[in-house]
Image (cartoon, grey):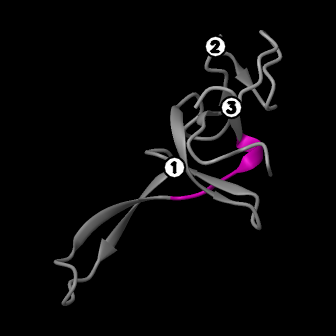
């Protein structure tokens, strides 16, 4: 799970959001899942209480790490490793 890190640019490889590019906002290593910004969003009806007014809120849900590929910042190709298979540059250098 060390391949996917918070802040990396990623692309969804399969599912209803396939092809969407987003930033990783949270990594759940024990469940082998990641949360991407604006991807796999569910709407939840929230009841009003003293802290919250109430209404419909949107919440991003986690995806399994096998459905996510990293985007190389140099050549913009999709890879599953920390080293790009196209240009050979490590993805850790650029942040």
- Circle nearer the N terminus (1, 3): 1
Residue 1 percent across, percent down from the top left = 80, 52
How crowded pointer 3 is (Cα within 10 Å; few <14, some 14-19, many 20+) is rated as: many
**Left of 52 or right of it: where is 9?**
right
Q: Is residue 79 above or below residue 54?
A: above
54 or 95, which is in the foreground? 95
**Left of 16 or right of it: where is 58?**
left
State the image quarter where residue 55 is shown.
bottom left
Residue 49 percent across, percent down from the top left = 21, 88
How crowded pointer 1 is (Cα within 10 Å; few <14, some 14-19, many 20+) is rated as: some
Residue 74 is labelled as 2
Give the number of callouts: 3
Q: Do the residues labelled 2 and 1 touch (CB within 8 Å)?
A: no
Stretch of the chain drawn in magenta: 61-67
49 or 17, which is in the foreground? 49
**Left of 63 or right of it: where is 43?**
left
User: On the image, numbered disc 1 is attached to which residue?
Assistant: 40
Rounded to the nearest angstrom, the CA distance separating label 1 from label 3 is 17 Å
Quadrant of the image for the C terminus?
Answer: top right
**Front disc: 2 or 3:** 2
Residue ranking furthest to the bottom: 50
Q: Kindly state the secondary structure of the residue where label 1 is placed.
A: loop
76 or 43, which is in the foreground? 76
**Front disc: 1 or 3:** 3
User: On the image, numbered disc 3 is attached to which residue?
Assistant: 70
Q: Kindly state the secondary structure of the residue where label 2 is placed.
A: loop
């Amino acid at each position: 799970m060390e391949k996917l890190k918070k802040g990396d640019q990623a692309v969804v490889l399969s599912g209803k959001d396939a092809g969407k590019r987003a930033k990783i906002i949270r990594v759940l290593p024990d469940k082998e899942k990641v949360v991407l910004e604006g991807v796999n969003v569910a709407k939840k009806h929230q009841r009003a209480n003293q802290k919250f007014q109430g209404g419909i809120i949107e919440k991003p849900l986690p995806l399994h790490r096998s459905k996510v590929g990293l985007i190389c910042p140099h050549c913009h190709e999709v890879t599953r490793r920390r080293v790009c298979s196209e240009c050979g540059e490590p993805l850790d250098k650029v942040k």
